[in-house]
Image (tube, grey):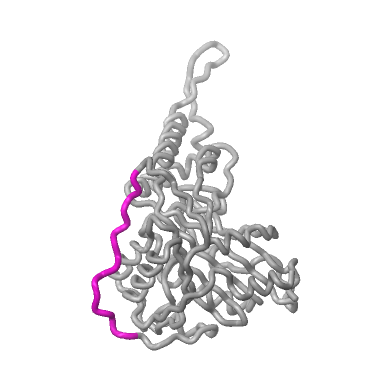
């Protein structure tokens, strides 16, 4: 029987709460293999990591934040006028110019401008970790996420013992309303539970192990790579959501498929295929997942709509020929067993 005290739920968010930051792992296409290898090293009883993503427009919020940063910089660049005892006026540099907030304002503004001019992808990274009873490790001991960074911020793991998160995992549901994190950004910054990325960052997180990185993994046996299928390119360039479009709440459980066979792709994706992977996000919520159970790794994909899941599978098959899929229940067997033993 599982000791519920060993069950940890977690969310991966921006360490310092800079909501415009877009961290990534270098080199590109090495993140998943590095993460799986680290999971293998710790060999937990069960681990489940979800990358849930959807196209969503935050242009208005980003524009407002850019204006506020611009106004701060303009104020900080304005000398402060003072007077001597005999009444002569003189100017001194404002104290804000010596602050860390001022030092990074241009980099943060640049990030905002890049995101404003591109499609926006909301991504939530969340999961569950169960240490073995023989392990004395506290928390979720994964450092791969900490290595995802840009010049503004980096990722960090935030853990919880709240079993209500299990419903979020099974539903593949993330926080999409980030309004309060924009509002409080200049005051008491809180870590936004979801990231605002551009399509350019997606291939850094959403990919299958390939090239030399596959050889160091022991928790799954890759299949034989096939020739690229002859079919129409299933990727559609990411489109910006129309501003003002109502946010239709997605209800019910998603359709989920397991990657029954992951091909042993000898080389990482080439540049033109990476550019295709940038377009894997949709206006329908999708997920890419890593599940580690009984010392075996399994990859999952999901979508809120069955027909959209079929498109996701076609996209992965186009990039990774030889991939085979199997439909699975949204609730993992480990979770079902956990519920019965509760």
Q: Residue at x 30, y 70 (%)?
A: 273
Question: Which is the main secondary structure of the residues drawn in magenta?
Answer: loop
Out of 87 and 121, give the one closest to the viewer: 121
Residue segment shown in magenta? 226-242
Image quarter (top left, top right, bottom left or bottom right) of the C terminus: bottom right
Let me know if residue 228 is in the magenta part: yes
Q: Is residue 8 left or right of residue 296?
A: right
Which quadrant of the figure has residue 323?
bottom left
Classify 22 as above or below 84.
below
- For the N terminus, the quadrant is bottom right
Going by the image, does 303 lie left or right of 114? right
Q: Is 307 colored magenta in this rendering?
A: no
Between 216 and 277, the residue placed more toward the observer is 277
Residue 87 visible here:
yes
Whether residue 150 is visible, yes or no, is: no
Relative to the observer, which residue lies in front, 185 or 71? 185
Which residue does the image show at 48% across and 54% down from the upper left? 250
Identify the residue at image location x=46%, y=70%: 301
Q: Relative to 325, is 135 on the left or the right?
A: right
Quadrant position of residue 202: bottom left
| In-image side of 92 versus 276 (left or right) | right
């Amino acid at each position: 029987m599982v000791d519920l005290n060993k069950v940890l739920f977690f969310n991966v968010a921006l360490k310092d709460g800079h909501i415009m930051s877009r961290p990534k792992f270098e080199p590109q296409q090495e993140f998943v293999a590095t993460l799986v290898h680290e999971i293998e090293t710790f060999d937990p009883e069960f681990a489940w990591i979800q990358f849930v993503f959807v196209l969503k427009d935050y242009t208005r919020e980003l524009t407002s934040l850019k204006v506020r940063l611009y106004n701060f910089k303009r104020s900080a660049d304005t000398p402060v006028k003072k007077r001597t005892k005999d009444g002569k006026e003189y100017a001194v540099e404002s104290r804000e110019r010596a602050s860390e907030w001022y030092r990074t304002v241009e980099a943060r503004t640049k990030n905002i401008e890049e995101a404003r001019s591109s499609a926006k992808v909301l991504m939530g990274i969340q999961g569950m970790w169960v240490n073995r009873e023989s392990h004395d490790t506290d928390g979720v001991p994964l450092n791969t996420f900490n290595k995802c960074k840009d010049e503004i911020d980096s990722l960090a793991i935030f853990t919880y013992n709240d079993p209500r998160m299990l419903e979020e995992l099974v539903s593949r549901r993330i926080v999409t309303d980030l309004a309060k994190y924009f509002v409080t950004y200049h005051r008491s910054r809180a870590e936004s539970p979801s990231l605002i990325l551009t399509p350019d960052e997606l291939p850094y997180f959403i990919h299958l192990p390939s090239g030399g990185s596959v050889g160091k993994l022991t928790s799954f046996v890759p299949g034989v790579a096939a020739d690229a299928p002859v079919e129409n390119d299933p990727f559609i360039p990411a489109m910006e959501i129309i501003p003002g479009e109502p946010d239709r709440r997605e209800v019910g459980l998603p359709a989920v498929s397991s990657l029954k066979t992951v091909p042993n792709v000898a080389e990482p994706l080439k540049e033109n295929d990476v550019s295709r992977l940038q377009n894997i996000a949709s206006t329908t919520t999708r997920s890419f997942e890593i599940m580690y159970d009984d010392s075996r790794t399994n990859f999952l994909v999901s979508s809120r709509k069955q027909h959209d899941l079929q498109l996701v599978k076609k996209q992965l098959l186009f990039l990774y020929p030889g991939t085979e899929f199997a439909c699975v229940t949204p609730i993992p067997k480990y979770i079902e067993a956990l519920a019965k033993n509760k």
